Image (cartoon, rainbow, N blue to C red):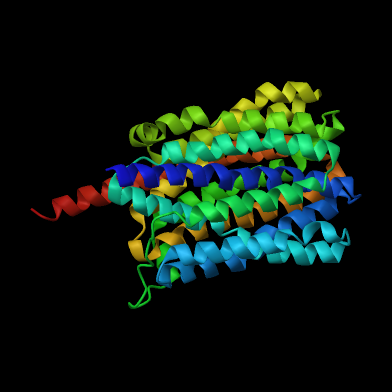
Amino acid sequence: MEESKKIYCFFIIFYAILFMSNAIYGTFLPVYLDYIGYSKSSIGVLMSLGPFIAIIAQPFWGIVSDRSKSKNQVLKLLFMASILSMILYPLSSNFYYLLFVIAIFTFFQTSIAPISDTITLEYLSATRQKFGPIRMAGTIGFAIMSIIAGFFAQRYIKSIFILNVLIMGLAFLTALKLPIIQGHQFGKQHVSIIKLFSDKNLVTLMVLNFLVQATLGFYYTYFPIYFKQLGGSSSLLGWAYFISAISEIPFLLYADKILQKVGTIKALLFSTFIASVRWFLIFIITNAYMFLPLQLLHGLIFIVLYYSMAIYINQEVPKELKTSGQTINNLIGMGIARITGSLVGGFLSDTYGIKDMFLYNSILAFITVLIFACVFCAMKRRSSFENTHNNQGKF
């Protein structure tokens, strides 16, 4: 029992440090690119490259993890390569150089989170411990680092890269303490990743997740820039992301009970509706300080999507494909969707402006809620009809 508690504490520390890194890179890289003089469309291209690389990287590393002797070995490799490539960022501001560095960095970095989730969830399934407090540690780590990174970015923007290297180094050292989780296809017959797409419910949930994540992709890339256009500083931006991160805690405290009561489908539809409301409010607000209380809505969007999908995959996907399932979901929801939101949003923003694009994202999210509510109702009626028909056939 004591050993189990000790391992649980290592998971908490690991997630806190891991999400600190996400706070630095995801929040302040667009600010850095804007600072060194790139247009919104150029920033869109650079920010969308990472998710584009993830289309190749995430399925690859998911398959490698499922077929490796231990998933931990793959995780350690990804950390070391990410740290080395992060060092290269501030050496040049040339567009093609940054394209190259972003491609190398994201080839390794984008699979760290889904593989970490797989290791964590598989261990917790065996010990019957909760994922919520561990993921909440990530939220708190993200929140704290948003303020710290904002402080450094305000004074010297390139310091975000030095800080990120240090944080990723700490995460790597903590990962060495995690329990070993084997690859379930190691030394066995390989199971094709295509089998994941035979689950119609999973595919439908992934499509819904994709659409709302596309609007989040636009938010993550262009909200920092829009925030500064309205007079917000890098330090204030850090506080904005601190509030958005802290807002995830109430859901994480009761996540398991909430999902047991309402189910994954209703949770995702609710989250998408809140996203629609949030994007509309960003459209009508014109003062940077007014965004601070609005950031509280973040706790009903991203974390609900992320947590619900991760738990669903861990419970429903065969053990031989659990890592592949997490990486494919991450690829679609935070890879292809982010490409769409960042790249398409960048070009449209040059024409219509960032402000109007938040209105269009609000409309897209609202239409998504209506369409998928109808789709899930139709699927439920069809399932009930088939079950009734099958039961009648038994008599």
Q: Is residue 103 above or below residue 34?
A: below
Question: Where does residue 231 sit, x and y in percent of width and height?
Answer: 86, 28
| Residue at 51% from the left image edge and 60% from the top image edge | 328
Total numbered badges shown on the rendered structure: 0
Q: Is residue 354 above or below residue 327?
A: above
- Near-viewer residue (377 or 336): 336
> Along the horizontal axis of the image, is 389 left or right of 208?
left
| Residue at 66% from the left image edge and 59% from the top image edge | 83
Give the farthest residue toward the left. Answer: 395
Question: Where does residue 45 sit, x and y in percent of width and height?
Answer: 79, 57
> Do we see residue 321 in this rendering?
yes
- Near-viewer residue (229 or 151): 151
| Residue at 66% from the left image edge and 38% from the top image edge | 145
| Residue at 19% from the left image edge and 54% from the top image edge | 390
Quarter of the N terminus within the rendering:
top left
> Do we see residue 272 in this rendering?
no
Give the farthest residue toward the right. Answer: 37
Question: Where does residue 92 sit, x and y in percent of width and height?
Answer: 87, 61
Question: Where does residue 173 sit, x and y in percent of width and height?
Answer: 54, 54
- Near-viewer residue (222 or 169): 169
